[in-house]
Image (cartoon, rainbow, N blue to C red):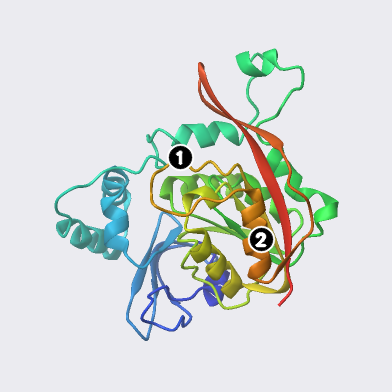
């Protein structure tokens, strides 16, 4: 974690009033923390930084239970006595049902998203059948379109391995990428360092409980998350973080397949809800092709809707 972002981060304990966090660094460099804690002086919450990734979630124990293989790797790979002791203490509390989230390394969706953020081979079977060559990463490239007029500090919700965040960093002064997958965030940070880009950072965080100061962002982007979250909770969270006249970009196929009990919306309903929350919609419904490769014989083909909205109040 880049140390300079500490002053922008807040406690996510819902019983606390979002005070700023303080850094305890046990392993790292002058500018970066590899292992440590982000601590709240009011409620005494401690949020671990593991392999350079800050995990800013209210319930770390539940998070660990949902990715038990990844949790085991944290213990094995930790180098500071403080983090290793913390993880072992948390591990001793784990009881009952555990699993490894499908978006973590070795999960069924991890490699799918890894491939989607890169060009497929020129001889890819599906793409060779299509008259129009659809590059899997072209949706991310759309974020650099000059017509969007994005600026300032940005937030990329559901950033996966950071392709959209990297594109946004070409236009914004600084951009934060958040995702619930530790493996995605770890990979995103590797890509950030490989490109030697210093105007971005990646955090494990909940989009409905953001660890940032109020009215902090000029631009917020959410790609393929509407159908995975409670939309009303998401927009309340976004509204607390976006500045007046800030830009909100939503890109989604509205692929509501999980029977979670959450409300399901189409493009028209999403636009009406955004208007009720104080957004002005700047474009019509769109159908932009997007391909995700599961394996050599299986693909997902979406038409995503691209919504550009401006916060009016």
Q: Position of residue 19 (x, y in %)?
A: 46, 83
Residue at image location 82% in from the left, 59% down from the top: 149
Q: Is residue 260 left or right of residue 132?
A: left
Q: Is residue 197 visible?
A: no
Residue that label 2 marks: 272
| Labels 1 & 2 near each other (Cβ < 8 A) | no
Earlier sequence position, callout 1 versus callout 2: 1
Tell me the mark number nearer the camera, choosing from 1 and 2: 2
The quadrant holding residue 150 is bottom right
Question: Could you say which disc has been placed on residue 198 in the image?
Answer: none
The quadrant holding residue 118 is top right
Q: Position of residue 152 (x, y in %)?
A: 73, 67
Residue that label 1 marks: 257
Quarter of the picture containing the C terminus is: bottom right
* Circle 1 Cα neighbour tier, 10 Å, few/some/many (<14 / 14–19 / ≥20): few
Vertical order, 241 against 143 (above or below): below
Secondary structure type for disc 1: loop
Q: Is residue 243 visible?
A: yes
Residue at image location 65% in from the left, 69% down from the top: 276
Q: Position of residue 296 (x, y in %)?
A: 51, 17
Vertical order, 2 against 287 (above or below): below
Residue at image location 44% in from the left, 35% down from the top: 109
Q: Nearer the viewer, residue 13 or 87?
A: 13
């Amino acid at each position: 974690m880049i140390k300079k972002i500490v002053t922008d981060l807040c406690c996510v304990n819902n019983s606390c009033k979002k005070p700023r966090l303080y850094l305890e660094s046990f392993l790292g460099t002058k500018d970066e923390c590899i292992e440590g804690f982000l601590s709240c002086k009011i409620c005494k919450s401690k949020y671990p930084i593991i392999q350079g990734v800050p995990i800013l979630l209210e319930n770390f124990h539940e998070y660990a239970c949902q990715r038990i293989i990844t949790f085991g790797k944290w213990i094995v790979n930790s180098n500071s006595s403080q983090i290793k002791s913390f993880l072992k203490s948390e591990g001793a509390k784990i009881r009952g049902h555990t699993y490894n989230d499908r978006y973590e390394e070795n999960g069924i969706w991890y490699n799918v998203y890894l491939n989607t953020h890169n060009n497929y081979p020129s001889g890819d079977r599906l793409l060779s059948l299509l008259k129009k060559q659809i590059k899997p990463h072209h949706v991310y490239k759309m974020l650099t379109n000059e017509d969007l007029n994005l600026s300032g500090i940005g937030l990329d919700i559901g950033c996966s391995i950071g392709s959209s965040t990297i594109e946004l960093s070409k236009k914004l002064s600084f951009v934060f990428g958040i995702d619930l997958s530790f493996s995605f965030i770890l990979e995103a940070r590797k890509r950030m360092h490989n490109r030697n880009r210093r105007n971005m950072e990646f955090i494990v965080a909940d989009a409905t409980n953001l660890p940032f100061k109020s009215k902090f962002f000029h631009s917020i982007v959410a790609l393929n998350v509407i159908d995975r979250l409670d939309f009303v909770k998401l927009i309340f969270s976004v509204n607390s973080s976006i500045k007046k006249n800030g830009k909100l970009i939503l890109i989604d196929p509205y692929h509501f397949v999980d029977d979670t009990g959450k409300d399901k919306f189409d493009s028209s309903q999403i636009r009406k809800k955004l208007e009720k929350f104080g957004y002005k919609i700047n474009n019509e419904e769109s159908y932009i092709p997007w391909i995700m490769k599961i394996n050599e014989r299986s693909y997902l083909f979406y038409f995503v809707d691209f919504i550009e909205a401006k916060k009016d109040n």
